[in-house]
Amino acid sequence: MEFFPLLELPEEIQAVVVERAARNSIQDLFGLKASSRSMKALAERRGVYHFLDVLSVPWGLNMPSELLKACYAEGNPSTLYIKGVQFFYTFNLKEEGLSLMKRAADAGYERAVYTHAMTRAIFWGEGKYLSRIPIESLDRIGKLVRSVKWCWGLWHTPEFKERMALFISHILPKFYSCQCGNPVERDCPCLWHIDVTKDDNMCPHCLWLKEIGLFLRDFEPVSLYRDTRKW
């Protein structure tokens, strides 16, 4: 198969290719950047920073602060999300944090769609945002969000811990008492077992209770490893 040389495409199409590469992964972007001078010039345009998913880069690689600031300045959804989560869950700046998460969610950033919906459900009892999470992607996105470990352990606010205690005392018993999904009898019907008690045939109500429970159990807030107040 013959391949059409990328550099023979019109510059505006080359720019779209660079943006798509940035959206896919930072590795793809830097691969294009290293391929030619013209690609390097396109990849270094500030507008490209809008499309990078900085959470696709292992946090341990210590991305330069200036790069993160540049991404945030371009309205990059992943940096809006990171800052929003840190503001809400670590600094207890709820209004600012929720607004940033919503901006990222409205931009279609799936981690933000999930976390914003969970936050509204847990802190305000608003379930309407849960419908923005595609059911077919719920398990994948939930695991993606909860898999991120922010380097310095748990920095949950007292209010978050209160919400978790309220869920365990008032909501969790409803999950275990519902007989949907071929429930497995547990000596200890606790939050720890919420993901292994019922199969995939559980009712929609219990499905969302399970997801909220997993978020309360496993989600870690952004630590002070990156202080986004400096962005």
Image (cartoon, rainbow, N blue to C red):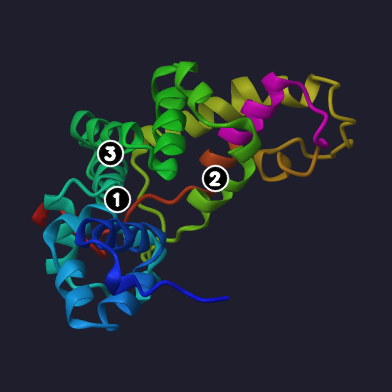
26, above or below 126, in the image: below
Q: Judging from the image, what secondary structure is the residue with disc 1 in? A: helix
115 relative to 177 in the view: left or right: left
**Percent x, y for residue 199?**
83, 37
Q: CA distance from mark 2 to mark 3?
A: 20 Å
Disc 3 versus disc 1: nearer the observer: 1
Residue placed under numbered mark 3 in the picture: 88
For marks 2 and 3 on the same chain, the one whose residue lies earlier in the sequence:
3
Q: CA distance from mark 3 to mark 1?
A: 10 Å
Residue placed under numbered mark 1 in the picture: 82
Q: Is residue 170 magenta?
A: no
**Percent x, y for residue 113?**
42, 35
189, above or below 41, in the image: above
What's the residue type where badge 2 is placed? Ile
Residue 141, labelled with which disc? 2
224 relative to 74 in the view: left or right: right
Q: Quadrant of residue 136?
A: top right
Disc 2 versus disc 1: nearer the observer: 2
Q: Looking at the image, do the residues carrying marks 3 and 1 touch, with CB atoms under 8 Å apart?
A: no
* Magenta-tinted stretch: 198-212
> Along the line of sight, which residue is nearer the eye, 31 or 87?
31
For marks 2 and 1 on the same chain, the one whose residue lies earlier in the sequence:
1
Looking at the figure, which quarter contains the C terminus?
Answer: bottom left
What's the residue type where badge 1 is placed? Ile
Q: Residues within 10 Å of mark 1 (few under 14, many from 20)?
A: many
Q: Quadrant of residue 102?
A: top left
Looking at the figure, which quarter contains the N terminus?
Answer: bottom right
57, above or below 209, in the image: below
Residue under the image location 31 percent in, 44 percent down: 85
Q: Judging from the image, what secondary structure is the residue with disc 3 in? A: helix
Disc 2 versus disc 3: nearer the observer: 2
